[in-house]
Amino acid sequence: MTFFSSQFVSLRTTALQALLLAALAMGIVGCSGAKRPKPVELSAITPQLALKPVWSVQTGPTVAAASGQGAFSPAVSAGLVVVASQQGRITAVSIASGAVQWSAELGVRIASGVGTGAGAAEGLFAVVTEPGELVLLDRAGAVRWRAALGGVSLERPVITGGVAAVRLMDNRLIGWDLETGARRWVIQRSMPPLVLHGESGLRAASPQELDFGANPLGPGDLLANLPGGRALWVNAATGVVSAESQVATPRGSNEVERLADLLGAPEVLEDAVCLAVYQNSVTCLAADLSRTLWQQRLGVVVPVAADPRLVVAVDASARVVAFDRAAGGRVWQNDRLFLRGLSAPVSFDRAVWVSDYQGYLHGLSREDGSLIARSLLPGGKASGPMLATRQGLLVQTQGGYVMLLRP
């Protein structure tokens, strides 16, 4: 097996760039002789937990060159793990065995990873192409239809309520009929002057492989994180907005400081929706978005992970901070991965997991945040959110591998 080291640079995932950009905007960095801070070297740990590969499949690279690239992450449905490569290939792998079930070539580059859904959407998969098409595939890898978006999207679609939903870069949220590929509804919201393209996300009900009983979303529910700190709860069948919340109000002396985009997909629990507001805060709202349960200031730069006990966030310096899910107080923080360009965290087994810019997968104890596991991923850093499933932890890497890991 070949191991790769990635130098992926993104405003979302590279803490160093985020820090320097903010500093430049405020006039702090202007001297040609200024030294940039360097990522900390890894120190030895005493492993207490190890994730071992159940299977690993090479599926094609997803390395992005700049901010604004959509997240490439596995979609799981109908016993299949389906991933996309930027070159245009969709690959389906059996989650049980790791055997490749089918591969489809779309003939164009793909802008973001695969979306799917639950219930009637089981076995359906959607991707967005760089030329601006939404493509729907079935569980056999056949293309059901291709629809022109009428705009550009860098975010993963989701399937729910009889539609494939996708958000365009002009802040239109659109539902496309699953049967015909026709546009069923459009929701438009104002666009802030400066946004992080491709960094927000949508959430629908989870397929059974990801359903741990904590997600209360129904078959037609759609939650949307938007730029400018806005969250929507939508009836996907009709396109009617049932609830809306201004999670954070952009503030600052310049447009960079006023960036307050909601990052990734909302984390939905039985009684709360938890969100990351870029360089602003970690927030948990009531499940109906009607009020703020708690909000903690933090310069967060990637989506949060949430479970019934903890909400875990990563800030611009790659400090990992865990908050009490119910009350919002800090439970622990870990500073030992300074500037290592961490991925979004995921809670799995006894640890919270993040991958860094060199492709190391780190496990932090859910009890006190101490480093209890470390391994090197084939293909470098995770290319999008890692998925905790009933079978294990799924990771897609920028170098082109998808793998299932478990203790």
Image (cartoon, rainbow, N blue to C red):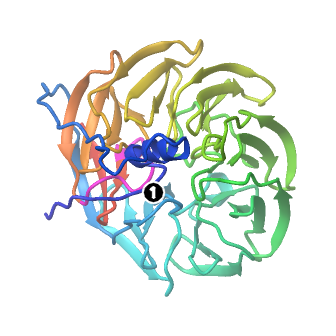
Q: Is residue 136 above or below residue 254?
A: below
Direction bottom: furthest residue: 107
Name the residue: 48% across, 41% down.
23
| Nearer to us in this view, 127 or 6 | 6
- Judging by the rendered image, the residue that carries numbered circle 1 is 73
Query: At numbered mark 1, what does the secondary structure look like: helix, strand or loop?
Result: loop
Asked if one can make out residue 233 in the rendered structure from this viewpoint, the answer is yes
Quarter of the image where one finds residue 153: bottom right
Quarter of the image where one finds residue 185: bottom right
Q: Quadrant of the C terminus?
A: top left
How busy is the neighbourhood of tag 1: few (under 14 within 10 Å), some, or many (20 plus)? many
Name the residue: 82% across, 38% down.
244
Asked if one can make out residue 343 in the rendered structure from this viewpoint, the answer is no
The magenta segment is 379-393
x, y percent for residue 373: 21, 32
x, y percent for residue 396: 36, 57
x, y percent for residue 230: 74, 41
107 left or right, relative to 327: left
Question: What is the magenta segment's predominant secondary structure?
Answer: loop
x, y percent for residue 226: 70, 48
Was residue 44 drawn as part of the magenta stretch in this picture?
no
Q: Amino acid at mark 1?
A: Ser
Q: Quadrant of the N terminus?
A: bottom left
277 left or right, relative to 96: right
Name the residue: 40% across, 43% down.
15
171 left or right, relative to 319: right
Q: Is residue 32 above or below residue 216?
A: below
| Nearer to us in this view, 177 or 140 | 177
Q: Is residue 387 above or below residue 290?
A: below
Was residue 391 drawn as part of the magenta stretch in this picture?
yes
